[in-house]
Amino acid sequence: MKALVPNGAVYGGYLARLVKALQPKVLSWVRATTADNFPIDNLLDLEICLPPLDEQRRIAAILDQADAIRTKRRNVFAEIDALEESIFRDMFGDVVAGSTVEDVAAADRSSIRTGPFGSQLLHGEFVDDGIAVLGLDNVVNNQFRWAERRYITPKKYAQLARYTVHAGDVLISIMGTVGRCAVVPEDIPTAINTKHLCAITVDRQRLEPLFLRAAFLWHPESRAHLRRQTKGSIMDGLNMGIIKSMPIPVPDMDQQKKFVTRIAAVTGRQIAARQLLVEHDELFASLQSRAFRGEL
């Protein structure tokens, strides 16, 4: 750990805010992951805007207040996220898991599948436009998100069409960031998934995709199975065999649909909260930039 000790001309709160604002530049100087490789001299030599002490205190107070508002918004967002789990546990936490994922998958033999392996799909075959390829970044927050866009040509897709992802498929990450789960939205364009994901097409007469996602994330018997199979509380790898044999409850469809309706209401609140959080972050970045340019 290294410390900057301000002299009498610098207010500590102002300096702390300034260093945080400079974080992207500071990180670009780091040559390795250890603190010993942090080039402190670069920071000491950096020219900064240094107004009088009273002005430094005023700027720090404004930024502290704005940051506190952002923190409250993040806390609200976290509480909304936790509401999904609470609803599931309240409705189904004590329902016996008497079936498996394989039992409720669609009858098609490829209803549980991973993406193309090895030379079937090389990184150099990605292009700027075409057929979408879904990966870990699309499910990392346990919600489907468009992040980095990857595409293959229609010609390449023709070779990999058996890996097509469908609306309502449940995606589970099995490599890298393991154990994340999301449902493919209804408006998905033609797309395939990478080898990092397992895609499950469920029998919609027996199971709602959102229910399977929730069971994977929160049902105690399902989670216990995953912990046993991966030999620890931190999942270090999944495969289709583990996923197929995962026990899940299958309550009646009316209860599942009621759950989906309640989750849809929560999702609406999540979207609104996420948008507000993005707006607060953008406003704070603008405020911070103006503050250290002497324009606040």
Image (cartoon, rainbow, N blue to C red):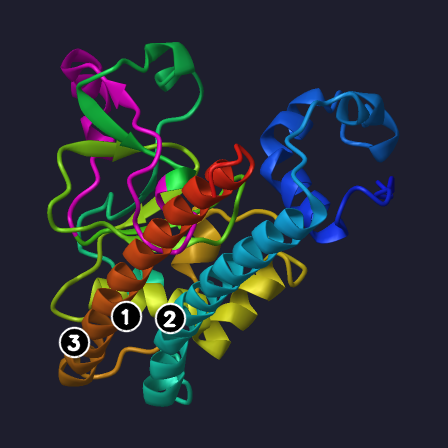
Mark seen at residue 195: none
Residue at 65% in and 63% down = 233
- Residue 48 colored magenta? no
Badge 3 element: helix
Mark 3 surroundings: few (<14), some (14-19) or many (≥20) residues within 10 A: few
Q: Which residue is mark 3?
A: 261
- Residue 142 colored magenta? yes
Residue at 52% in and 64% down = 68
Q: Earlier in the sequence, mark 1 or mark 3?
A: 1
| Magenta extent | 138-167
Q: Which residue is mark 1?
A: 211
Instruction: Identify which amino acid the numbered label 1 is placed on.
Output: Phe
Measuring from the top left, give residue 134's x and y in whole percent. 31, 35
Instruction: Identify which amino acid the numbered label 3 is placed on.
Output: Thr
Q: CA distance from mark 1 to mark 2?
A: 6 Å
Badge 2 element: helix
Measuring from the top left, give residue 263's x and y in whole percent. 24, 73
Towards the viewer: 133 or 28: 28
Q: Earlier in the sequence, mark 3 or mark 2?
A: 2
Q: CA distance from mark 3 to mark 2?
A: 16 Å
Instruction: Identify which amino acid the numbered label 2 is placed on.
Output: Ala
Measuring from the top left, give residue 196's x and y in whole percent. 44, 37
The reply to whether dot 1 and dot 2 touch (C-beta < 8 Å) is yes
Q: Which residue is mark 2?
A: 215
The reply to whether dot 1 and dot 3 touch (C-beta < 8 Å) is no
Q: On the rendered structure, is 93 left or right of 13?
A: left
Residue at 64% in and 40% down = 18
Q: CA distance from mark 1 to mark 3?
A: 11 Å
Q: Is residue 157 visible?
A: yes
